Amino acid sequence: MSCRVPGVPRVLHHLSLCFVAESFGQNYPEEADGTLDCISMALTCTFNRWGTLLAVGCNDGRIVIWDFLTRGIAKIISAHIHPVCSLCWSRDGHKLVSASTDNIVSQWDVLSGDCDQRFRFPSPILKVQYHPRDQNKVLVCPMKSAPVMLTLSDSKHVVLPVDDDSDLNVVASFDRRGEYIYTGNAKGKILVLKTDSQDLVASFRVTTGTSNTTAIKSIEFARKGSCFLINTADRIIRVYDGREILTCGRDGEPEPMQKLQDLVNRTPWKKCCFSGDGEYIVAGSARQHALYIWEKSIGNLVKILHGTRGELLLDVAWHPVRPIIASISSGVVSIWAQNQVENWSAFAPDFKELDENVEYEERESEFDIEDEDKSEPEQTGADAAEDEEVDVTSVDPIAAFCSSDEELEDSKALLYLPIAPEVEDPEENPYGPPPDAVQTSLIDEGASSEKKRQSSADGSQPPKKKPKTTNIELQGVPNDEVHPLLGVKGDGKSKKKQAGRPKGSKGKEKDSPFKPKLYKGDRGLPLEGSAKGKVQAELSQPLTATLQRTVLRSKREMQAEPPVSPLPCGRSRIAQELGLLGSKHQWQV
């Protein structure tokens, strides 16, 4: 049984696309356009719905949010202790959900950087995804487990049904509007579930050229249209129409619209996604830093973007509105964009670019104040309508930011983050108030800091609210799984640094009532580490002849010029330099 849609409309649609492409240029990136360095190693990235902010998850647990228009860091959230492996923006951009390799899923408030909720799973998390229309629901894909849908308001979870209980290598994704959830297992079986009731609506099996099945690696949906792609273990990307899948129903046999692959190198694909308009597909190689771009309508390969040789690709994200791709390799985010060609005629309509020098012939009336030969222009429709009032107050919605079932943009959307400028070397009072005003302000600051100190001592300042942590219990899920980012499971004999004290140090560092504590100068800070051992070694040795000569020299200086302070300057300075203030040595000077 085949449910293939006739291809005639697709051909007509392709012809119109070709006309648009020839008129306005290509809609895919063609060259590298710089990098974004997050200082720490980047592992995953995702754009918000408008492409104004880019969230990057790092291996030190931080989430770095970039302002993509200025290419500057807008916010850094210290989210996790372990590496961040998956990120997703909410629809309005105010929330972020993240997953780390220590099986923790957290929701973050983007403006404040605070954690709203935290969920602990028994196995590592491969993917987290917000519901496209309801940010109260989050889809989680744990390893060796069926997908789980979280409800954030009541911290409850629902385990989605699977085709084979023995095969729990399942990936899942919401469709474009969140009405259905598509799941795929290692045997190539795709299930389409109703989001609200988890009822099975449609199903089919992905097969190779023969009747053999292939494992499903990922499922990705386009932002526009009803198409989605399936990345499988046989190194072929299959593109389907979601409406055709629903029409075929259970155990259907839909034919893919396109089959995309690298026939020459047989490249396996690490990450695949659609362009913002859904007309192009990009796939990142799992062998090297290379991006392959196909045109979805006819399936031809239009571009291959090559990164640095020898690097491995980790993640790929296409900008929602513009022909820009962000890819991650070697911990750095690479940006790919179109080649910007300067068009001077855009600034002056009568401007002409010349390939070579041309001798200019001056017109007779070119520099006259009034052109006598100029004919009176006829009043056209545009000139006649110049006196009409123009509406400059109302704002028309941008079509690229609205879905097909929406008429207006989201007024509460978070497009940008406020950034406070950081001054590295501020000048000392370049244009500030006079010195007496500065002294007054210093006194006021001292009084206010004293009040703050007292209030914190009294405990009147409210403590920061600790996020609620919910443990998610899943039946039959192994607890010893290791996330793919961290490598395969070992035998426990890896060379790890032992925590705590080294062997043989137990009981040797206890404080003794006869052993004075060592301090740094007059600040009362105890010495630690190598400095403490150095001073202890100095205390155990007798005073050397050089030290005795230094004491005698300080004695002569004090006799010649009596000190003003109660503690002689020479003794205080020597004692501070040697770190012996308050030690067992008594200075007889």
Image (cartoon, grey):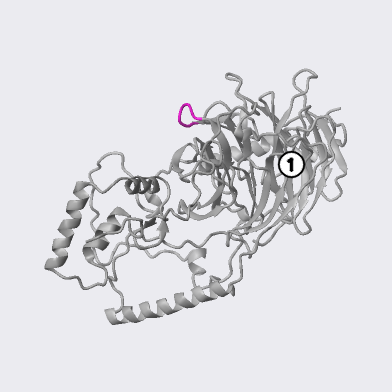
Query: Depth check: 181 or 401 in front?
Result: 181
Residue at x-position 37% and y-position 55%? 348
Q: Residue 398 placed where, x, y %?
A: 60, 58
Q: Residue 519 placed where, x, y %?
A: 39, 57
**Left or right relative to 237: residue 376:** left
Residue at x-position 61% and y-position 67%? 463
User: Label 1 amino acid?
Assistant: Pro
Which residue, given by chain and number where applicable, does mark 1 sit on? 122
**Left or right relative to 487: residue 165:** right
**Is 536 contained in the magenta span?**
no
**Is 309 contained in the magenta span?**
yes
Up the image or down, 553 lies above or below 474; here it is below
Q: Residue 528 placed where, x, y %?
A: 42, 50
Q: Residue 329 placed where, x, y %?
A: 51, 35
Up the image or down, 259 lies above or below 566; here it is above
Mark 1 packing: few (<14 Cα in 10 Å), some, or many (20+)?
many
Q: Which residues are magenta?
A: 306-311
> What quarter of the picture does the N terminus occupy?
top right
Query: Depth check: 27 or 565 in front?
Result: 565
Residue 366 in view here: no
> What quarter of the picture does the C terminus occupy?
bottom left
